[in-house]
Amino acid sequence: MNFILHPLTLVTFFPLLGVLVLLFLKPEQKDAARWVALVTSLITFGISIAVLAQFVPSNPELQLVVNVPWIQVAGWNIAYHMGVDGLSILLLLLTTFLTPISILSTWTAVEERVKDFMIFFLLLEVGMVGVFLAQDLFLFYVYWEFTLVPMYFLIGIWGGPRRMYAAIKFFLYTMAGSILMLLAILWLGIQGGTFSVPELIAKGGIPAGVQTWLFLAFAAAFAIKVPMWPLHSWLPDAHVEAPTAGSVILAGVLLKMGTYGFLRFNLPLFPTAAVKLAPWVALLAVIGIIYGAMVSYAQQDVKKLVAYSSVSHLGFVMLGLFALNPQGIQGGILQMINHGLSTGALFLIVGMIYERRHTRDMDAFGGLWKIMPIYGALTLIVTLSSMGLPGLNGFVGEFTILLGAWEAGRDGGPLNSYLFAGFAAVGVILAAVYMLFMFQKLFLGPVTKEENRVLKDLNWREIATLAPLVVFIFWIGLYPRPFFVLISPAVSKLVGVLQVAAAAMP
Amino acid sequence: MTILDLLAIFPLTVLTGWAVLLIVADLFIPRDRKSLTAILAAAGLLVTLALALMQAGQERVAFNGMVVVDGFSIFLTVLFAASGLVGIALAYDYLKRMQIERSEYYILLLFSISGMILMASAADLIVVFMALELLSIPLYVMAGFARPRLDSEEAALKYFLLGAYAGGFVVYGVALVFGATGTTSLQSIVAVVTAGQANMTLMAVGAALILIGLGFKVAAVPFHMWTPDVYQGSPTPVTAFMAVGAKAGGFAALLRVFVVAFPSLSDDLTPVLWALAALTMILGNVVAISQSNIKRLLAYSSIAHAGYILMAIVPFGQQAVRSDAVASALFYLAAYAFTSFGAWAVVIALEKSEQKGLALDDYAGLGAKYPLLAASMAVFMLSFTGVPPTLGFVGKLYLFRTTLEGGFIGLSILGVLTSLVSAYYYLRVVVIMYMRSGEPQAHRERWVGLTVSTAAIATVVLSIFAGPLFSWASQAVLKLF
């Protein structure tokens, strides 16, 4: 029974303890609900730090593995199989890190049905952490689908005016992809006799033609989640309608589940198909980079602008992953973290101004720097980080990705053309354009609207929600080595698998 | 017939005997204490349930091979007896509240369950037909139980006419199979076919007619026309019982007859079943979208779920997949029973007299006012959709695995796509409950509440600890000859 007290079990299911406590609270006990949720998520974060402490960075294999039989009857071979390696350790930490921050951000923003909100939020954390740790396809799918339910309620109950539409669209879109993945999972389980990912990878030997189909079925689920162009249309709706904390988690973690899925399943399980389809995925990624940037530029609503910028940024991640070389994949993983931090922070920033003014229209603002200097300074840092200014985190990720894409672009490389890296570089410039444009409209120039003069600057709680993010923005930007150390052994192992497949191709 | 025969099917013997006794006993129960009949009926079902559980692991043939007791029949007997108990629990307060309390309800229910149990054990086409009628006729009466309410009478008449018509198809099918093989015993049919003495064309036509007749019972498209009207018009506990029990009864016969006796016809019948499953899933789910009455919505949903279960029967002719086909269908029937009874119980809790309180809009605000009821309903809707962690998800997974094992990738893709469609209307119920405001009125009744909470907890917990249910379903194999 010691799997129950295993660190990975604890980090996944500890939030349920908070849910249990919350169930006994009365609806009127709003502050109690907030504190229970915050403390629970902070303890969960603490457990994830303990996991990090036990994690050996130099080991490329899965660590802290817990593997006990779950359903082993009637031809099923399903196990409660969890583990963490270089591909997932940072995402685990990102999830447990962003959850308390998001909860803190709801302190005054969510006033209705606080208890229920916190219950759904903690349930969401269980699902998200589980997704990053599950090593059994069935278990993974359970976590993966389960995240839909709390997020659906978070958007649908606490969202904006078009919340019902956005919630259903979110649910149906994501489910559309994942059901195809479900069939592929079943197919793998029937053929391989197991749902264990490491065992299936070790077994290999799936014919190339079948690999392509399975790759596409998995990709359907993940590409919608990322979201890759042209499957992104649920994202702006979900983001705009979701409450701030929901947007932070949606952008910060849920989208990463898609990119992580490609990394964890598509690349090692179907390496031949991955090598074969890499240019196509990269093409969609680059279109996403440019398209997302251009649409962002056209937005009036700040939240929509940030939402579309995610399409662009995650295009970078996908390009990095499908460069299929160490730089590209490492950059991709780091950029997932960067995007979680920067875009999470941007959504918090948008939420803060929305809470004060109840509008997100850019024309309603201008010259905010004079009124809210702390807010302005923090926003500037986050904006610069998001557009990839050297010295901040975004630069490190994007630069590594571009290196990887360039390297993969040489003759005979997986991408076989320098154009991918070239167009992606254009995307970096476009990012600077729309981000600075937004900053200028909001913060610079004279104060255009009188009602903005009375806005209060950030209070301590709001600074406390942004400060940890800013610390990491600088840390990764100035000294990314500790992060790469965590990632690189596992990436080298993955690249090894891909190179074997590439070499075996005709 | 010997005493041994009766002992072999002891649960059925006891239940039928009990039902007959209850008719007599009921005469002496005063009119204002008819709930005593309900308690007695429930006691009979509990005894049946216990006896069936004691039979676990046995395999017997009785009545000269006309009836067989095996894992399959025991699994279903337990399911039917449990459904009967829920049928009583749901009706107990409902009948009083709607002022239609008559003790015949409980007695008819017992007879219908006897028919279902006999169906699960039938090893002869004649017995299949007998069981079909025994399970159906009480249901015809029960559908009209709310008379003189017009739509209840309409439901009874419609169900009766179409049910009788479907029964005709079954009889004619049996006759043709008899003509083709010279026997109605499943065992002998296999023997005659193996010996090459059967007229395969005639037998295929007969089997197809039986399929049509049973298709009516399980509400497969295009034989589903009666379902929405009957489900809507019948008193809701009857509907709930029909949706679970009668459907499972129909599938019991389909599985037994097709898997045991007709594998030799799979070349002809597999495409037919494929098309039936596909049509049922598509039409059930698509038409459900436009429903605004919860009973009609659940009626179309029950049609759709018949399609999913049919999917498992499509590979009935393949030796290797056969046991998974049976096991996955049984597992799904059990999963569906939990979810469906739960959902219907919520409907009963909210229903008011004169067919009020049944519109989807009457569910607005349920999440705020009755959090537990709404949360349970949300669980049932998610389970119907097939979202983990619910039994519906695990059950669908098993069905899809069977379909993939049989090599029907196209059908399984159709299955998941229609599940996606279904997500839309199931979620709409959730949307209305949680995201709109309203002043719903729910009845707080002990047995209905118990059914809702038990079903909700079971739907979630049994999906996480699915092992026992899996192994039970996989051991519920058909006795093959």
Image (cartoon, rainbow, N blue to C red):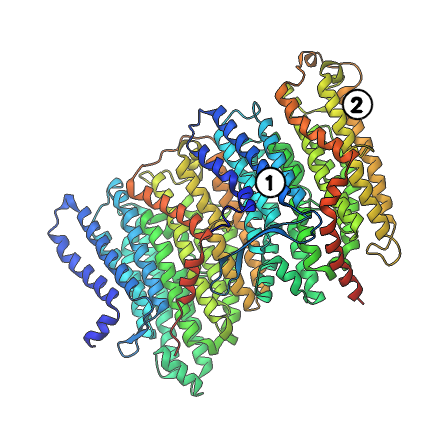
> Considering depth in this image, is A255 or A7 the residue closer to the camera?
A7
Q: Position of residue A408 (x, y in %)?
A: 84, 52
Position of the N terminus of chain B, as image quadrant, is bottom left
Q: Is residue A171 above or below residue A389?
A: below
Q: Is residue B469 above or below residue A469?
A: below
Task: Examine the image and state in which quarter residue B96 appears.
Answer: top left
Q: Is residue B351 above or below residue A193?
A: above
Classify 10 Å Cα crowding around label 1: few (below 14), some (14-19), many (20 and above): some
**Type of residue at label 2?**
Gln
Measured Cα–Cα span from mark 1 to mark 2: 42 Å
> Considering depth in this image, is B24 or A199 the residue closer to the camera?
A199
Image point (41%, 76%), residue name: B261
Image point (53%, 58%), residue name: A78
Task: Find residue A50 and name its label.
Answer: 1
Q: Is residue A119 left or right of residue B118?
A: right
* Circle 2 SS class: helix
Q: Position of residue B48 (x, y in %)?
A: 25, 60
Q: Is residue A325 above or below residue B67?
A: above
> Considering depth in this image, is B334 or A255 the residue closer to the camera?
A255
Precedes in sequence: disc 1 or disc 2? 1
* Circle 1 SS class: helix
Does residue A354 appear in the picture of this structure? no
**Type of residue at label 1?**
Ala
User: Circle 2 is placed at which residue position?
Assistant: A440
Does residue A39 appear in the picture of this structure? yes
Classify 10 Å Cα crowding around label 2: few (below 14), some (14-19), many (20 and above): some
Image point (39%, 41%), residue name: B358
Q: Is residue B348 left or right of residue A359?
A: left
Residues indicated by labels 1 and 2 sit on the same polypeptide chain: yes
